[in-house]
């Protein structure tokens, strides 16, 4: 009987530990949680929108909770030179050695939530032509990217907006980029821009 009790207690503690790592349990009563993204070039404060993008926000917070964004990089800093406009800053999926990081199950694409891919919004990335393949990579819109919004086809799901740290994103946008043979991609910063940490900001009491 004692062994059975200990086993049940261990299982309950294990389940509680797993639950604590799921984004849906992170500030679960806060519809607009805020995070601070600390990078090697400065910090960015983002307000997430659970009211419009609950699946995407909770997915993002799961990765925040398990600390797996620490040490990841922004691997894509893309500018549309032809039209002389900034485009996106994308990251969260690779380390400094361009090794892909672990991914949880893909999530449903919430691009029809009414949030737009406007400048300084944050959105979920997905694989080309696979709209429900988003996992851990995200990007910041560095212009009003209307063509990324849904129309006849799926768009990219926006799940928050930058509140502070615009200057950090602007600084990242100016880094020198090169072609990276390992991932076969242009627009990769020559000097890695590292995500040192993403941490929750405690909500201000009403």
Image (cartoon, rainbow, N blue to C red):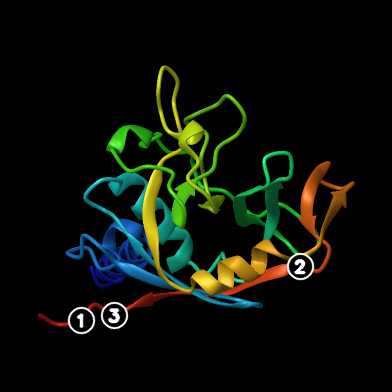
Let me know if residue 110 appears in the view.
Answer: yes
- Residue 83 at x, y percent in the picture: 67, 40
Q: Nearer the viewer, mark 1 or mark 3?
A: 1
The residue pinned by badge 2 equals 192
- Residue 128 falls in image quadrant: top right
- Residue 205 at x, y percent in the picture: 14, 82
Q: Could you tell me if the residues under marks 1 and 3 are in contact, i.e. CB atoms within 8 Å?
A: yes
- Residue 55 falls in image quadrant: top left
Q: Earlier in the sequence, mark 2 or mark 3?
A: 2
- What whole-number distance in Å separates the C-alpha atoms at marks 1 and 3? 7 Å
The numbered mark at residue 204 is 1
At label 3, counting other C-alpha atoms closer than 10 Å, the crowd grade (few under 14, some 14-19, many 20 or more) is: few
Q: Nearer the viewer, mark 2 or mark 3?
A: 2
- Residue 10 at x, y percent in the picture: 34, 69
Q: Residue at (32%, 61%) from the top-left corner?
A: 19
Using the image as rendered, state which of residue 119 and residue 100 is in the foreground: 119
Q: Secondary structure at mark 1?
A: loop
């Amino acid at each position: 009987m004692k062994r059975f009790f200990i086993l049940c207690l261990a299982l309950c503690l294990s389940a509680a530990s797993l639950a604590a790592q799921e984004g849906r349990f992170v500030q679960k009563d806060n519809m607009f949680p805020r995070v601070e993204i600390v990078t090697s070039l400065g910090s960015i404060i983002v307000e997430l929108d659970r009211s419009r993008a609950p699946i995407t926000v909770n997915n993002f917070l799961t990765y925040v909770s398990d600390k797996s964004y620490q040490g990841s990089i922004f691997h894509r800093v893309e500018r549309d030179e032809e039209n002389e406009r900034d485009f996106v800053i994308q990251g969260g999926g690779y380390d400094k050695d361009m090794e892909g990081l672990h991914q949880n199950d893909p999530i449903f694409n919430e691009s029809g939530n009414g949030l737009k891919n406007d400048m300084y919004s944050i959105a979920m990335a997905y694989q080309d032509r696979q709209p429900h393949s988003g996992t851990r990579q995200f990007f910041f819109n560095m212009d009003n990217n209307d063509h990324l919004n849904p129309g006849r086809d799926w768009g990219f799901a926006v799940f928050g907006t930058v509140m502070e740290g615009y200057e950090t994103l602007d600084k990242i946008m100016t880094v020198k980029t090169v072609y990276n043979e390992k991932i076969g991609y242009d627009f990769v910063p020559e000097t890695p821009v590292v995500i040192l940490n993403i941490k929750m900001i405690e909500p201000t009491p009403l």
